[in-house]
Image (tube, coloured by chain):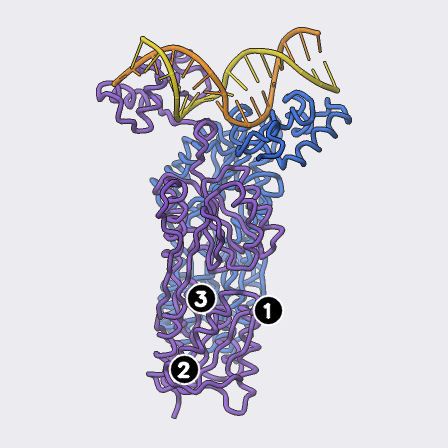
Chain colours: A purple, B blue, C yellow, D orange
Amino acid sequence: MPRKASLRKAGKPPDIRTVAALAKVSIATVSRTINGSPLVSDRLSKRVWQAIKQLNYFPNTHARTLVSGRSRLLGIIVENITNPFFPELIQSFESIAVGYGYEILVSSSYGDPATLTKCVRRMLERKADGVAVMTFGGEETVLDELVHHGVPIVLAEFKLTDPKASTILLDYSTGIHAAVRHLAELGHRHVAFLAGPHTLHSAITRENDFRAAIVAEGLSAQKKWVIECDHTLKGGMAGFGRLQSLAAPPTAIVCSNDMTAIGVLRAAYKSGLRVPENLSVIGLDDIDFAEFTLPPLTTIRLSRVELARAAFEALRQQAEDPGNPKLQREFLVSTSLVVRDSTAAPQA
Amino acid sequence: MPRKASLRKAGKPPDIRTVAALAKVSIATVSRTINGSPLVSDRLSKRVWQAIKQLNYFPNTHARTLVSGRSRLLGIIVENITNPFFPELIQSFESIAVGYGYEILVSSSYGDPATLTKCVRRMLERKADGVAVMTFGGEETVLDELVHHGVPIVLAEFKLTDPKASTILLDYSTGIHAAVRHLAELGHRHVAFLAGPHTLHSAITRENDFRAAIVAEGLSAQKKWVIECDHTLKGGMAGFGRLQSLAAPPTAIVCSNDMTAIGVLRAAYKSGLRVPENLSVIGLDDIDFAEFTLPPLTTIRLSRVELARAAFEALRQQAEDPGNPKLQREFLVSTSLVVRDSTAAPQA
DNA sequence: GTGAAAGCGCTAACAA
DNA sequence: TTGTTAGCGCTTTCAC
């Protein structure tokens, strides 16, 4: 024998009508109350909230989206969740978004333009209010559809002319310069750089910033000491091998990302070289694991928290205040040096 | 001057009516066609698909959900995305789900029951068709609301009596036994275990499985060699310290998870002990990073891919075939030994 | 086989 | 201030 059969239509969750009936108001008043409209009197508002509580009611987001056109859903597309750079980014993005009442849709492009296209399509189907494309790849050219549908979008290191698109620029220069200076102050003169693949825009930027830092610090700049790797552990190991085969191997290596540095660590370990006694190593990214390597890795931190905050902010502004002509369209995220145990003065 | 103004209502994306008009059929026929109803004649079906293609139309998922009650949204709640155990799980879950036309909602409970409750509430609001609660914590008791709302749910190592709830059981025993046997075959007699916190159900299971394996292999079982740690790097370091201070330290250590093992690796490195020459170390989980430690870690793999597959399958069955009385309610995921370089024969 | 029409639960325009 | 009502885009009876 169901209690309050009159109000709680058996089985089904309460809807806005149920609440209205209990509070003895119209459904419009319930809607206004929930959405914080200032037009509702305290008296009715109180009655409504009480009914809501009593029924444990919550609005149907799909119905809401259908009529309002806004889903409070934000997409985030990364290259691959298992790439250690991304979990922290997603985590931060999620917690910020949830704090603002948004939900997030995560997907991976696997570095493949066709897959990216599908991800975009899915975001469109789910009516995402905005999409953060954090692939750092070159695949961003596929984003036409998103832009064409007028969805706010934010990219990392890639500019789109569309007014709905924002960009997050990364200032690698500061961190890389700090790293080179750190090495110079330690007494290193021969510093190498294991670069990322030149297909990646960001890899080239990092490499150029390194060269500039070497010059700025007045260190010895040799072409042989800059080697293109591929941002993988194996690439780092191979890069180390090539450097060691040089007539005059460097005493310190800066790597374009942490995985490369970890490869160097492993190759050095295998070859019997001690880090940091015989060789100093610096990574870039500061993935969670950098702290756990042997020895703990000195690295250039690219704050995932800041990146997430910028991405969210870009999207939120575009979504909630699209008319505003002076929206911030460019964001800058900086880098900084984190000194741990993989760097030391070179041997005499 | 807009082209085809008659069919493409300016600006707005095409809806089911637009398609119906172009194909010269009713909207019901369009709906049936899209949903693969067998009642549509080939002739009309062809016309409809052509119109869909021409308009680049896709259905509004929110409208669909509103009327059908099914969202094709699956939730996955983990303890923390940045915990290295989870990215691969989420990745697998996502790619399987996407393959079946589902989208996933990811959230983190941070090991906190109150947060878990909020996550659950959000999943409910978004009308998730099912939720995988992969927290492995003890917080699962908070799941009443989910169950009460009749949402399919799948838990790891935790049983709920509700018919909508499934459980994934983990067979640690196989992997742990294989690890102990591996050590025994290498010649180890003194094998220690660095356990997880006893607040975790799974930690206790792992510990018991270890004891059983020691007995089964006829190795020396000493109480002092089983120490409760906390599944962190620091805990592993501390555990190593306690083991080394023993009158007769073990020659091999099995750890309840990989982070603990990584802590042991670091502590051993600091103390000058060589792994695996002076000490063999085995982890559990096989997080992505286990492959990159120094030396690469021998570990007991808990397949995240299998876990994800089981979780998805449980949810899909419950969501798509709820009536079926003989649904699989329990799934088993096994473990296996992955031998890398952190184990070797003990020194004479 | 196909179409007309009734909602799904909500927001927002319009009335009162 | 509050209520009435018209859809949002779709699925699903129910007729034909």
> Crowdedness of circle 1 by 10 Å Cα count: few (<14), some, many (20+)?
few
* Front disc: 1 or 2: 2
Q: Are marks 3 and 1 on the same chain?
A: yes
Residue A332, compared with residue A56, is above or below; it is below
Instruction: Say whether residue C2 is left or right of residue A217.
Output: right
Who's the residue at 44% across and 62% down the image?
A: B259
* Helix, strand or loop for disc 1: helix
| Mark 3 vs 1: CB contact within 8 A | no
| Mark 2 vs 3: CB contact within 8 A | no
Mark 1 and mark 2: Cα distance apart in space = 57 Å
In the rendered image, which residue does mark 1 sit on? B185
- Mark 2 belongs to which subunit? A
Instruction: Say whether residue B300 is left or right of residue A206.
Output: right
In the rendered image, which residue does mark 3 sit on? B262
Q: Nearer the viewer, residue D8 or A24?
A: D8
- Mark 1 belongs to which subunit? B
Mark 2 and mark 3: Cα distance apart in space = 39 Å
Mark 3 and mark 1: Cα distance apart in space = 23 Å
